[in-house]
């Protein structure tokens, strides 16, 4: 999807995007807005009009969501960052155990390396 197609989609489905953003806590929307505004500044500095247009649409979505959210009492699902992190870790553990099972089923013949045992040289005299 090209940037022009995305921007067209952002304009045509403006309300749907705003409704989706309204589900987020206001603090998260505030952080998103700050980040988008920083990126807009960089786009202006780099004179990148396409990026500026996309970011401006995002900014309008976020601002509209914050305005509507403040006017209405919308049930926002509680998003706990710790729960999300735990879910990510659980996913990684499951994936690694799956990979381990595959590795166990298809062993690779690798030479077994024995650790070198350092001999006791306490009986030797030192030159230093």
Image (cartoon, grey):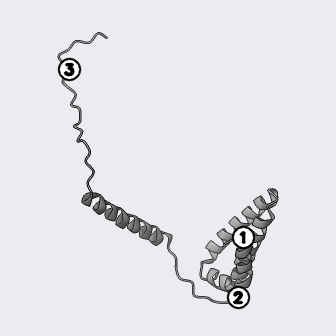
Residue where numbered disc 1 is placed: 3
Q: Residue at x 71, y 83 (%)?
A: 14
Residue where numbered disc 3 is placed: 121
Residue 55 in picture, x, y percent from top left: 74, 69
Assign the C terminus to one quadrant of the image. top left
Name which quarter of the figure residue 58 lies in: bottom right
- In the image as oriented, which residue stretches furthest toward the top? 127
Q: Which badge, 1 or 2, comes first in the chain's sequence?
A: 1
Residue where numbered disc 2 is placed: 71
Q: Please determine whether, in this image, residue 16 is positioned above or below residue 99.
A: below
Position of 109 with respect to 48 (left or right) is left
Q: Residue at x 22, y 37 (%)?
A: 114
Position of 110 with respect to 75 (left or right) is left
Name which quarter of the figure residue 121 lies in: top left
Q: Please determine whether, in this image, residue 46 is positioned above or below residue 89.
A: above
Foreground mark, 3 or 1?
1
Q: Residues within 10 Å of mark 3 (few under 14, many from 20)?
A: few
Q: Residues within 10 Å of mark 1 (few under 14, many from 20)?
A: few
- Spatial separation of the CA atoms under disc 1 and disc 2: 32 Å
Q: Residue at x 72, y 75 (%)?
A: 5
Residue 101 in picture, x, y percent from top left: 28, 62
Name which quarter of the figure residue 107 lies in: bottom left
Foreground mark, 3 or 2?
3
């Amino acid at each position: 999807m090209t940037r022009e197609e995305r921007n067209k989609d952002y304009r045509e489905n403006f309300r749907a995007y705003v409704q989706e953003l309204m589900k987020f806590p206001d603090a998260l929307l505030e952080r998103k807005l700050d980040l988008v505004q920083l990126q807009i500044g960089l786009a202006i500095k780099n004179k990148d009009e396409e990026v500026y247009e996309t970011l401006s649409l995002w900014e309008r979505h976020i601002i509209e969501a914050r305005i509507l959210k403040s006017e209405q009492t919308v049930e926002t699902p509680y998003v706990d960052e710790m729960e999300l992190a735990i879910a990510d870790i659980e996913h990684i553990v499951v994936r690694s155990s799956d990979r381990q099972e595959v590795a166990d089923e298809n062993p690779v013949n690798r030479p077994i390396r024995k650790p070198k045992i350092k001999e006791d040289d306490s009986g030797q005299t030192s030159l230093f």
